[in-house]
Image: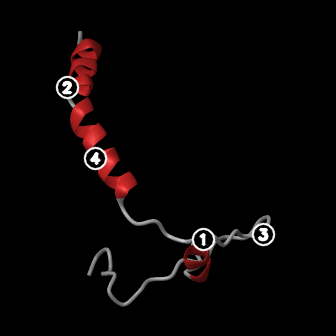
Amino acid sequence: MNLLHVLGRLTALESAQAALLDEVCAGPLLKASTLADAGALAMPGKGEAVPRTQSDDQGDLFG
């Protein structure tokens, strides 16, 4: 019975989700060069970890 309840709730949200998707799709796009310059497309080599950085405006998890 819980599965039917969840499916019913999901179908009730469909119109709101469609509106949100339309808004996202109508928004500005980022160029691949912008993402590359920000390091968002950097791929680590085999066995290497991607270095994590913390910007000044990003708060500490526990601070």
3D distance between C-alphas at marks 4 and 3: 37 Å
Q: Is label 3 in a helix, a strand or a loop? A: loop
Residue 50's quadrant in the figure?
bottom right
Residue drawn at 28 percent across, 19 percent down:
7
Q: Is label 2 in a helix, a strand or a loop? A: helix
| Contact, mark 2 vs mark 3 (Cβ under 8 Å) | no
Amino acid type at image mark 2: Ala
3D distance between C-alphas at marks 2 and 3: 45 Å
3D distance between C-alphas at marks 1 and 4: 24 Å
Q: Is label 1 in a helix, a strand or a loop? A: helix
Q: Earlier in the sequence, mark 2 or mark 1?
A: 2
The x, y position of residue 53, in whole percent, is: 50, 82
Q: Is label 4 in a helix, a strand or a loop? A: helix
Mark 3 or mark 1, whichever is nearer to me: 1
| Contact, mark 4 vs mark 3 (Cβ under 8 Å) | no
Amino acid type at image mark 3: Gly
Mark 2 or mark 3, whichever is nearer to me: 2
3D distance between C-alphas at marks 3 and 1: 20 Å
Q: Residue furthest top?
A: 1
- Viewer-side residue, 49 vs 35: 35
The x, y position of residue 5, in whole percent, is: 21, 17
Q: Disc 4 designates what residue?
A: 20
Q: Residue furthest bottom?
A: 56
3D distance between C-alphas at marks 2 and 1: 36 Å
Q: Disc 3 designates what residue?
A: 45
- Residue 6 lies, with reference to residue 15, above or below; the image says above
Q: Disc 2 designates what residue?
A: 12
